[in-house]
Image: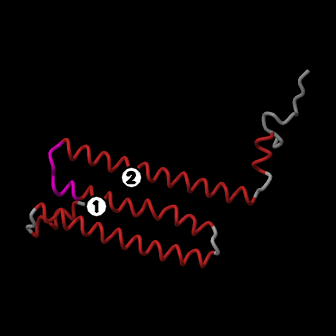
């Protein structure tokens, strides 16, 4: 981010024009990522036969696209230098949204992996819930 700020400062660009340039660059970058993501997901789903790879790519594609927008927003805030409460609040909200979005994507990824693994071991989930796997309720210790 510092590199972009130094480059815009060396060019002598006014703060509003720099903010507009950053916004336009953010929209272009997000559009390119979305386009490549759509093409990549299509190619990957054709190649893998709709397996875990295409679903994983679908899970990660949206958070990546939103992250580009929010990083662009953070760049604009840094470049425009608004008053202290505004920049603190906006940066805090953007970082919180980023963290929540990636947490949800990570949870969906773990859910996908667990569902795929339960397909490889079909009796694993039933034996854990019924206590037949030798766990605490396996019935090895008899009570009177």
In the image, is 48 to the left or to the right of 9?
right
Vertical comparison of 65 with 137: above or below: below
What label sits on residue 72 in the rendered view? 1
Q: Which residues are magenta?
A: 76-84
In the picture, the quarter occupied by the N terminus is bottom left
Determine the residue positioned at 88% across, 33% down: 140
What label sits on residue 98 in the rendered view? 2
| Residue 79 shown in magenta | yes
Separation of marks 1 and 2 at Cα, in angstroms: 12 Å
Q: Quadrant of residue 52?
A: bottom right
Vertical comparison of 94 with 141: above or below: below
| Residue 56 shown in magenta | no
In the image, is 102 to the left or to the right of 94?
right
Q: Position of residue 77 (x, y in %)?
A: 21, 54
In the image, is 26 to the left or to the right of 113?
left
Determine the residue positioned at 80% across, 39% down: 131
């Amino acid at each position: 981010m510092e590199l972009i700020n130094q480059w815009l400062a060396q060019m002598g660009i006014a703060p509003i024009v720099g903010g507009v340039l950053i916004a336009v660059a953010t929209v272009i970058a997000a559009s390119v990522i979305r386009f490549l993501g759509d093409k990549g997901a299509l190619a990957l789903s054709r190649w893998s036969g709709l397996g875990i790879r295409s679903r994983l790519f679908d899970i990660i594609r949206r958070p990546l696209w939103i992250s580009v927008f929010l990083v662009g927003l953070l760049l604009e805030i840094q470049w425009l230098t608004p008053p202290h409460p505004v920049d603190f609040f906006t940066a805090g909200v953007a970082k919180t949204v980023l963290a929540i979005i990636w947490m949800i994507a990570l949870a969906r990824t773990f859910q996908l992996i667990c569902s795929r693994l339960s397909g490889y071991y079909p009796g694993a989930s039933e034996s854990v819930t019924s206590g037949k796997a030798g766990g605490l309720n396996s019935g090895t210790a008899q009570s009177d």
